[in-house]
Amino acid sequence: MANLTRRQWLKVGLAVGGMVTFGLSYRDVAKRAIDGLLNGTSGKVTRDRIFGNALIPEAQAQTHWQQNPQQTIAMTQCFGCWTQCGIRARVDADGKVIRIAGNPYHPLSQEHPIDPSVPFSKAMEQLAGESGLDARSTACARGPRCWKACTVRYDCLNQ
C-alpha cells in the first residue's frame, strides 16, 4: 500500500464501500441464516417441531375416513374462469378457507370422476390412498387463488 495511485485508492474505496453497503443491506438475512443454522427455525418458533407450520390434516385415513372435526369440507365450483371446475374447499371452524383442492366427483378435476352414488367417505379414501395419478383430483392454479377474491370485500387486486 506504499505507492498507491489515486485511481487505485478510488478502486479500493469503492470496493470497500460496496462491501459495506452489501453487508448492511443483508444483515437481517444473515442473522436469520445464522439463527436457522443454530436453532433450526430461522429464529421463528413453529407450531410443531417436526412438521413446522404445515396445515392440520383434513382427516385420518388409516383404517377408514375420519374427517377432522375442526374443519368442514365444501364441494363447490371455482369461478376463476368460465369453465367452472369442481373444487373441494377446506373450511375451518371460523369460516376461513384453509385450502382448495379438486372435487373427486367433478369431471373437470379428475380424468375418471368418482360416481356420485359412491359415499363421500369412500371417495375420500380413494383420494387418500397411494394410487398414483389415477386417483387424484386437482384444481388449476387459478382456483386456489380466486377464493380470496370471493372472500375479500374488494376485487382480486385488494384495493
Image: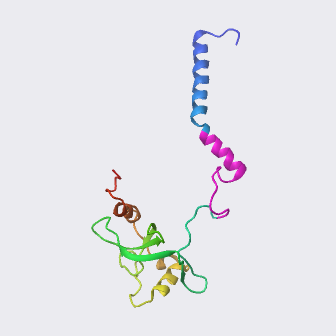
At horizontal 34% and vertical 64% (from top left) the residue drawn is 150
Which contiguous range is marked in magenta?
A: 28-50
Q: Is residue 135 left or right of residue 13?
A: left
At horizontal 67% and vertical 64% (from top left) the residue drawn is 50
Which residue is outermost to the bottom?
Answer: 117
Of residues 12 and 89, the one nearer the viewer is 89
Find residue 146 and report its image quarter. Answer: bottom left
Q: Is residue 85 left or right of residue 128?
A: left
Numbered-mark total? 0
Vertical comparison of 62 with 24: above or below: below
Q: How is the image coloured?
A: rainbow
Q: Looking at the picture, how far across and down is residue 115, in whole percent?
A: 39, 87
Of residues 33 and 152, the one nearer the viewer is 152
Which residue is outermost to the left?
Answer: 82
Q: Tell me if residue 46 is in the magenta stretch.
A: yes
Find residue 14 and report its image quarter. Answer: top right
Q: Is residue 79 left or right of residue 15?
A: left
Which residue is outermost to the right?
Answer: 38
Vertical comparison of 124 with 147: above or below: below
Q: Looking at the picture, how far across and down is residue 159, in whole percent?
A: 33, 50
At horizontal 63% and vertical 41% (from top left) the residue drawn is 30
Q: Looking at the picture, how far across and down is residue 116, in whole percent?
A: 38, 87
At horizontal 50% and vertical 74% (from top left) the residue drawn is 71
Q: Is residue 14 left or right of residue 135?
A: right
Q: Looking at the picture, how far across and down is residue 43, in whole percent?
A: 65, 49
Q: Tell me if residue 71 is in the magenta stretch.
A: no
Vertical comparison of 23 with 107: above or below: above
- Quadrant of the drawing holding the N terminus: top right
